[in-house]
Image (tube, rainbow, N blue to C red):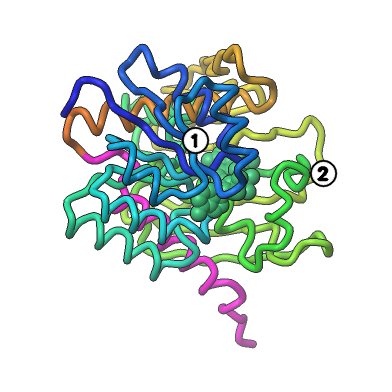
Amino acid sequence: MADRIAVGLIGCGFFAQNHLHAWTDLAPEGADLVAVCDIDAARAQAAAEKFAVPHWYTDAETMFRERGLGLVDIATQMRTHLPLVEMAIRHRVPAIVQKPFGRNIAEVRRMVDASKEAGVFLAVHENFRFQRPLLKIAEIIRTGAIGMPSWARIGFRTGYDVYTGQPYLAKEERFVLIDLGVHVLDVARVFMGEVAHLTAELQKRNPRVAGEDTATMLLRHASGAVSVVECTYESRRLPDSFPETLVEIEGDEGAIVSRIGSKIEVTSNGRMQVFDADPPVLPWAERPWHVAQESVLETCRHMVEALRAGRPAATSAEDNLRTFALVEAAYEASGKVRPEV
Ligand code: NAD
Ligand code: 89V
């Protein structure tokens, strides 16, 4: 592989602004953002001008044909992921795709199979894996400080107005599970291991949205551990924890409890210690988004490292299929179990 990687970005919308900053920051590490593309010409041009990207396009196919990319970053909404990933694979260009990976598991399987068959790197921008407080918790578990984790509660509960920045969310028929459930279920897999079975209850608490805005899930992991995994955009409590995932994990020798502000309390063998895992506010970031923004940079950095090393990303297409399967299982399970009297 060439020393420098020519990166193309598809989608210059709301969240892609963070990708644009991240790729700009990664130039000293050998990633050159050489082209941006958006079907909205004004957005593509504005991104190119703001971030000094030499080429902008309104047609992804043309960008692939003309730019000889070493990596493409797809930051469009989920309904475009399948055609754009298939396009990248046809051009044999390694690809990263934003979450949710696809609209449903059939699309996700198709992308996984296509990348495997073609031998083309494909990974999902599952940035919660790279959030500083969540990385710290994973590290604490690995050290054995709490012993064997056997119970957890993993929750993303907020009332933050996500609809102003992402108005399309209010119209999604399958909403919070596929948008946010993918993140918290992925976190549950990382902390507690693969899932043997699960059940879920979904609610639409906000009458103005089309899909479910609250999901409460109960998971049994292959290890025998149990976790309660929750996500909602309808929590009215102060202080609001957006965009933090709060975690409680109990093991046979201790416990981990995370608090708002990325504070992590670790009890190990009867002694409690507090860690501050609040990420720096990058020059282009702002509170409270800085936790997510730093993770975008770390996700992109991880992708470049994996690609250079010739290994799959931690959040490879195949890995994310396992998380996506949990989302589908939760939709399937909702409302299924009735008490028999
Ligand atoms: P958005 O609608 O603001 O931006 C998407 C952009 O893609 C638009 O500018 C649109 O014109 C463009 N586009 C659509 N089809 C295209 C095509 N075929 N070729 C080129 N450009 C095309 O959406 P958004 O809010 O930025 O979300 C994008 C993705 O990012 C979604 O999948 C969303 O779930 C995800 N997201 C992730 C996080 C996170 O923390 N990981 C946060 C927010 C959004
Ligand atoms: O990940 C997401 O798509 C966003 C969030 C606000 C959680 O970052 O909805």
For the residues carrying marks 1 and 2, which lies nearer the camera in this image?
A: 1
Give the quarter of the image for residue 142.
top left
Q: Is residue 249 left or right of residue 305?
A: right
Q: Which residue type does callout 2 highlight?
A: Arg
Based on the picture, tell me whether residue 318 belongs to the magenta stretch. Answer: yes
Tag 1 secondary structure: strand
Residue indicated by mark 2: 236
Q: Amino acid at mark 1?
A: Trp
Q: Is residue 194 left or right of residue 329?
A: left
Residue on which disc 1 sits: 56
Q: Nearer the viewer, residue 204 or 285?
A: 285
Residue 290, position as x, y percentages in the image: 61, 23
127 or 197, nearer to the observer: 127
Residue 98 percent across, percent down from the top left: 47, 45
Where is residue 329? Give x, y as percent.
Answer: 46, 68
Residue at x 52% of width, y 66% of height: 330
The N terminus, quarter of image: top left
Looking at the image, residue 18 lies above or below residue 121: above
Determine if the C-beta at disc 2 is less than 8 A from ligand 2. no
User: Magenta residues, as a range?
Assistant: 312-341
- Tell me the quadrant of the picture where the C terminus can be found: bottom right
